[in-house]
Amino acid sequence: MNAVPGYTLPSIKYKQKATIATAVAFVFVGLCVAMGFDPALLFTEFHYVRDLAGSMTPPNFKVFWSDAGIYMAIAESLCMAFLGTLLGGLGGLALAFGSAGPTMPWKGVRMVCRGILTLLRVIPTLILILIFVVSVGIGPFSGVLTLLLATIGGFGQLFTQVIEQAEPKPLEAVYSVGASRVQVIRFGLWPQVLPSFIANMFYAYDVNLRAGIGLGIFGGGGVGFQLFMAIRLLHYKEAFALICVTVVLIVLMEKASDLLRTSLLQKNL
């Protein structure tokens, strides 16, 4: 069919984008109707946020001089993230070696290890913290156990993929000179996966530090629990001060982990 002079037919790419946009619009409208949600509330109900912001400002930083327990809570959050990352990373690495084909020849063992990683990965961290709060009580120990299992599930699968994507030629070279499987893993595989393991462990620490603060609100201890108590007692200015310090703490630890990761990777390479 010839186009009318002065007009251009829409391209196939334009039709595809229009179809996707229309489908997204229909899904959005359908979800709003199903949940009884009025999209206009996104533009008309922000006065509650304005009122809350007014009650939280200016932040009351005097709480850091009047309550020495806050410093202990900050130290608890840092220790929770460190222990959860270290123990969870080692556990995830062990399960990764057990679930990866290049390191585990028995299919049954691989299936069991992958099943454990899948189970830990699909359980939400909030469910885990509630289970541990009920079983071992409120405090940093519950937070450490939650971060430990969350790290095993999340990063164990990542370590498995790193091991399986390793270059096979160095492994074959070490194996060809009569090395055992353990020696092949030590001298052919481990040097390849170590940089990724180091980088991901530092990333896991950043993730766990943020998650640990959030878990404290549900009884995991640390500065998150202090923040929850300040909000519960309607001490909003103290709560805002804790939020500001938490943001600064996370940024500083992120920069420190970046520097350490870069330094260790350069030395390793």
Image (cartoon, rainbow, N blue to C red):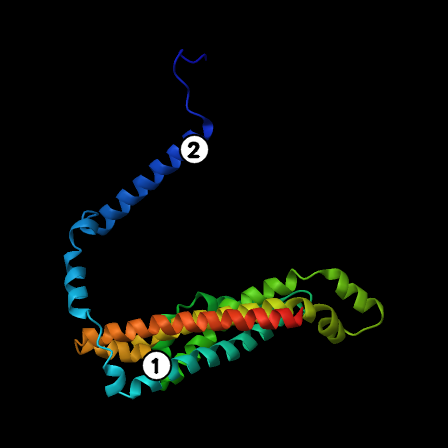
Quadrant in the picture for the C terminus: bottom right
Determine which residue is flagged by label 1. 222
Q: Residue at x 80, y 68 (%)?
A: 175
Q: Which dot, 1 or 2, sits closer to the camera?
A: 1
Q: Earlier in the sequence, mark 1 or mark 2?
A: 2
In front: 190, or 54? Answer: 54
Element type where label 1 sits in the image: loop
Q: Position of residue 231 (x, y in %)?
A: 21, 75
Element type where label 2 sits in the image: helix
Q: Are marks 1 and 2 in contact (CB under 8 Å)?
A: no
In front: 5, or 175? Answer: 5
Q: Position of residue 134 (x, y in %)?
A: 33, 82
Q: Position of residue 193 (x, y in %)?
A: 64, 67
Q: Residue at x 68, y 71 (%)?
A: 190
Query: Tag 1: Cα neighbours inside 10 Å, few (<14), some, or many (≥20)?
Result: many
Q: Position of residue 51 (x, y in %)?
A: 14, 63
Left or right: 243 as drawn, with respect to 186: left
The amino acid at mark 2 is: Gln
Q: Is residue 254 visible?
A: yes
Q: Is residue 153 visible?
A: no
Determine which residue is flagged by label 2. 16
Q: What is the residue that sits farthest to the right in this orientation?
A: 177
In front: 126, or 242? Answer: 242
